[in-house]
Image (cartoon, rainbow, N blue to C red):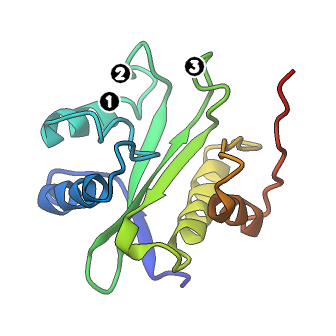
């Protein structure tokens, strides 16, 4: 699986592929596309692209957001968008329980190891950004995502609420 995908920043060029990616999630009844920086809530691809581009820079980041790098996971063999993943460089009050990273894989490409490879590659980006650790939130019922985190050296720590 390694090197079968590459993380690339969104641009205007893959617009149709990106819209197809979003459509597949919706067709499978998924209203939330994790790690997409609201791609699931923004009608205009160009508007979304502008937002994710501005949010990469501390000088232009939305005042309600944090500096975030968002990437499409593109399969090398056919240039298909397999997933999306983001890296939040800091956590604000809203994000403290959600963590530094969110990701999703298109429904037709799940259980093939792509999420683990996406997170592995994102960890390299985090290291380059001098981040010392990442916090990733996962539902306790999401065994697949727990395995992705553990495969990348993460430790699953269930939270208890009183």
Left or right: residue 100 compared with residue 64 = right
The image shows residue 115 at horizontal and vertical percentages of 54, 66
Q: Label 1 neighbourhood size at 10 Å, few (<14), some (14-19), many (20+)?
A: some
Question: Residues under labels 3 and 1: Cα distance?
Answer: 19 Å
Judged by depth in the image, the label closer to the viewer, 3 or 2, is 3
Asked whether residue 34 appears in the rendered view, the answer is: yes
Q: Looking at the image, do the residues carrying marks 3 and 2 touch, with CB atoms under 8 Å apart?
A: no
Tell me if label 1 and label 2 are in contact, CB under 8 Å. Answer: yes
Q: Please name which of the two marks, 3 or 1, marks the residue nearer to the observer.
A: 3
Q: Residue furthest top?
A: 63
Q: Quadrant of the N terminus?
A: bottom right
One can see residue 74 in this view: no
Residue at x 81%, y 52% (from the top left corner): 156
The answer to which of 28 and 40 lies nearer the viewer is 28
- Real-space CA distance between mark 3 and mark 2, rounded to the nearest whole angstrom: 19 Å
User: On residue 54, which mark appears?
Assistant: 1
Closer to the N terminus: mark 3 or mark 2?
2
The residue pinned by badge 2 equals: 60
- Where residue 11 appears, as percent x and y from the top left, is 22, 51
Q: Position of residue 91 (x, y in %)?
A: 62, 26
Q: What mark, if any, has residue 94 been given in the picture?
A: 3
Q: Earlier in the sequence, mark 3 or mark 1?
A: 1
Disc on the earlier residue, 1 or 2: 1
């Amino acid at each position: 699986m390694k090197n079968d995908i590459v993380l690339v920043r969104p641009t205007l060029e893959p617009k149709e592929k990106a819209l197809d990616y979003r459509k597949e999630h919706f067709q499978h009844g998924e209203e939330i596309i994790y790690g997409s920086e609201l791609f699931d809530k923004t009608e205009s691809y160009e508007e979304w692209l502008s937002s994710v581009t501005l949010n990469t820079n501390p000088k232009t980041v939305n005042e309600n957001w944090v500096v975030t790098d968002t990437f499409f996971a593109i399969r090398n063999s056919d240039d298909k968008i397999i997933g999306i993943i983001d890296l939040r460089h800091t956590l604000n009050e809203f994000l403290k329980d959600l963590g530094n990273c969110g990701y999703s894989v298109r429904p037709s490409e799940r259980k093939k190891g792509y999420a683990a490879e996406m997170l592995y590659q994102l960890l390299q980006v985090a290291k380059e950004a001098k981040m010392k650790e990442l916090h990733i939130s996962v539902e306790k019922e999401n065994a697949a995502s727990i395995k992705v985190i553990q495969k990348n050296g993460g430790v699953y720590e269930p939270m208890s609420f009183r």
